[in-house]
Amino acid sequence: MTDVAALSSVFSHAAVDFDTLERALQSPQALMECAVVALCLALAYLALSPFKAGRSEHGIWLAPRPHQGALFAVVALVLVVLARWLLNTQAGWTGLVIFRLAIPVMVSFVIVRIGARVLQAALPHSAMARALERTLSWLVVLGFALWVTGLWHVLMEALNDITWHFGGAEVSLRAMLNGAVSAVVVMMVVLWVSSALEARLLSGAGGAQGDTLSVRKMAANGVRAMLLFVGVLLALSAAGIPLGALGVMGGAVGVGIGLGLQRLAANYVSGFVILAERSLRIGDVVKVDNFEGRVTDIQTRYTVIRAYNGREAIVPNETLLTTRIENASLADPRVALTTTVLVAYGTDLEALMPPLLAGVRQVPRVLAAPEPAVQLSNFFMEGLELTVVFWIDDPHLGQGNVKSDVNLKVLEVLVAQKVKLPPPPPPPPSPAPSVHSAVAHKPVEGSGRVN
């Protein structure tokens, strides 16, 4: 397990002092070493140029640009170490102070690049990921600066002298720092593996919808939760915390759930229940609390519903289990839609209905079975109300657009049949001015302006 002590021992063999570095930079060999290091970076860039990832968030090794991936940093470090070995053993170069400084710089670059790529893969499109990337970069730069200035060992000795008693044992601040670094490394590996497995599971679905995508989503969420749980246990063990202390922590978590976290726990459990029983699937058209749209994602805590106008609703999973949900795609994706039209009294309905049905059948999204229907639904003073009923099986593509196409076809048939439409209702009469308002607007005598 990599920890602060191990890194310190590795860097101690490569540390250089400023006097040695100043003398080395004045020699011609320093320029040759710099040229070799630059050549190693160029070779790493050229070697990875043919291999580009289409989408940078799907992996940590490759990216749209070679230098953005973690593999570039690893390949460059390997080339620099190999070049130092060849120059030292084959060419007989001694000193190699530039390489002794370049190798720790490349190790720092590898740590920053791998950490940044893992965070981008585990937390895509997250502002927290960007903040964690900057924090990691600054910590690595600070550690490198402490090593260059020779303060690294001084700081480690000072941290080793700061101790206190914890659970009957004496614990130093350096030991806790080692454990924290080990825990961070373990959690980074767990996030990397879980994000890679989740991307693999979901990418295999392709254009799948409904049951297939929901099952894959449930498997991805389950794998991520299991790996995170195992990662927490390994991180605690790496930090030196005995697993027997988890009993106390579990009791505290149980009290917290009983006092105020029961809704959060209920949302997580509800997410797995929804995915397991398949009562709500990705791609279903649902209506929740007068908000209608298509389910685009089911997370462990919430579900995303996207309306036809582009708005998205974040619905807690517990709400989806405890309230009535209208699902238009659960058992049968076919949905019946209606539109109405008023025609004047005296219209020959027996002759009008067949052309209306023929026109509605010509709309591409209208299903032939069940067949559309035209019904005399009501009588009004203005005319007769006809209701056109038709079915579609793709409500996720929108309902207003197909209803508009049907209305246009109905209007085309009415014009072709020369059907008289009732006149529009007269506008409501304007209210008569009140006596108070008339008096208020009456000019007051003697109110003229005197010059």
Image: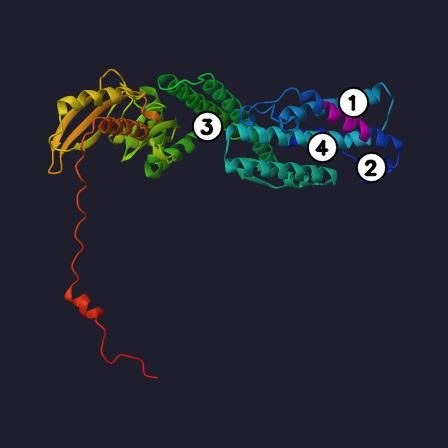
Residue 262 is inside the magenta segment = no
Q: Say whether marks 1 and 2 touch (CB < 8 Å).
A: no
Q: Main secondary structure of the magenta part?
A: helix
Which numbered disc flags the more N-terminal residue, 1 or 2? 2
Q: Say whether marks 4 and 1 touch (CB < 8 Å).
A: no
Taking the spot 55% from the left edge, 25% from the top edge, the residue there is: 55
**Which picture quadrant has residue 350?**
top left
In this view, the residue in front, 284 or 406, is: 406
Q: Which residue is mark 3?
A: 244
* Residue type at numbered disc 2: Leu
Taking the spot 79% from the left edge, 24% from the top edge, the residue there is: 84
Q: Nearer the viewer, mark 3 or mark 2?
A: 2
Mark 4 nearby-residue class (10 Å; few <14, some 14–19, many ≥20): some
Inter-mark Cα distance, 2 to 4: 15 Å
* Residue type at numbered disc 3: Gly
* Residue type at numbered disc 4: Val
Q: Say whether marks 3 and 1 touch (CB < 8 Å).
A: no
Numbered range of the magenta stretch: 34-44
Q: Nearer the viewer, mark 3 or mark 4?
A: 4
Inter-mark Cα distance, 4 to 1: 15 Å
Q: Secondary structure at mark 3?
A: helix
* Residue 83, numbered circle: 1
Can residue 238 be seen here? The reply is no
Q: Is residue 422 left or right of residue 225?
A: left
* Residue 105, numbered circle: 4
* Residue 21, numbered circle: 2
**Could you say where residue 190 lies in the image, as x and y percent from the top left?**
52, 25
Mark 1 nearby-residue class (10 Å; few <14, some 14–19, many ≥20): some
Which numbered disc flags the more N-terminal residue, 3 or 2? 2
**Which picture quadrant has residue 60?**
top right
Q: Identify whether 393 is placed above or below 155.
A: above
Q: Identify whether 79 is placed above or below 429.
A: above
